[in-house]
Amino acid sequence: MMNFRKAATAAGLVLGIVTGLVGPAAADVPAAIKERGKVLIAIDVSHPPYGMLDSQARETGSDVETAKLLAEDMGVALEIVPVSGANRVPSLLSRKVDMVIASFSITEERKKVIDYSRPYGVIPVVISAPQDMGIAAPADLAGQALAVARGTTADIELSRIVKESGVNARIVRYEDEATTNTAVATGQQKILAAALSTANEVSEQNPGLNLEVKLDMAAYPMAVGLRKGDDELKAWVDEWVGQNLENGKLNAIYEKYFHQPLPDVIPES
């Protein structure tokens, strides 16, 4: 099987031949962004390690570094527009932002109303619970309450699992990741459905809870969210993703925050 980076190189060369471009810097930045002099990017800064605030209240995290890299390659300033998991799509559709970089996984439901760039990462979603809880299959969730952030991929997958298995479980939806995590950390809820990185973080910050991953729900490709019809911007971002996967910059960001490299082949959906 062809190595992903070799495949990306070949694809990039073909694209360059067809379009006459040699990289993101050579492509035309959409006029509205160029004229404005800054790109407006929605980021959830309450969802570590994707987005968070450091000790000096500055935005940091993998999504923030990805957005900074994109703005730098565009040659414009970056303006971060804070969002939650639930209002990522509305902020895009209402034109409050140019794009979304907020642990934004590709789902069929979202694809009905928005567009996506080429994927640049992956997001595993899991169910975690205390070690002494015997959860090995969806049926073991019967009678349990499960905390999840509204509108996230974990919410989508948890809803699917509960519906398909027919298990009598109660989904408790919170408005954002921070509130969800607090509910688990303070003992309001015992079971958490979330991205693997979030589940690990809650476990590490609350060792007394003895949380562990019980069920793997899915692994979603992660991409930049865009409005349908913004074809020029999508073309630019797609090329940007390809170049920065090839040169290793996106992988370096992923490794820094997730302590593992990107997969050789990132699924498209």
Image: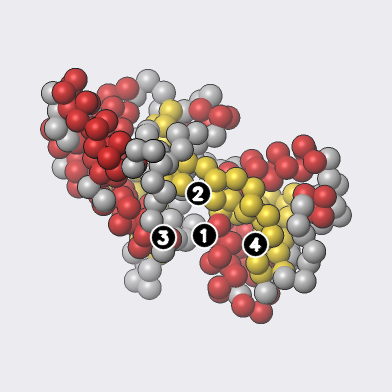
Name the N-terminal-most of marks 3 and 4: 4
Q: CA distance from mark 1 to mark 4?
A: 11 Å
Q: Quadrant of residue 34?
A: top left
Q: Amino acid at mark 4?
A: Val
Callout 2 crowding tier (Cα within 10 Å): few <14, some 14–19, many ≥20:
many
* 3D distance between C-alphas at marks 1 and 2: 8 Å
Q: Secondary structure at mark 2?
A: strand
Dot 4: few (<14), some (14–19), or many (≥20) neighbours within 10 Å? many
Q: Which residue is mark 1?
A: 197
CB of mark 3 within 8 Å of CB of mark 4?
no
Residue of label 2? 123
Q: Residue at x 78, y 66 (%)?
A: 133
Q: Residues within 10 Å of mark 3 (few under 14, many from 20)?
A: few
Label at residue 213:
4
Could you give the CA–CA distance between mark 2 and mark 3, rounded to whole angstroms?
Answer: 12 Å
Proximity of marks 1 and 2: CB atoms separated by less than 8 Å:
yes
SS at badge 4: strand
Looking at the rendered structure, the kind of residue marked 1 is Ser
Foreground residue among 261 and 123: 261
Disc 3 secondary structure class = loop
Q: Position of residue 211 (x, y in %)?
A: 66, 69
Give the labeled residue for mark 3: 260
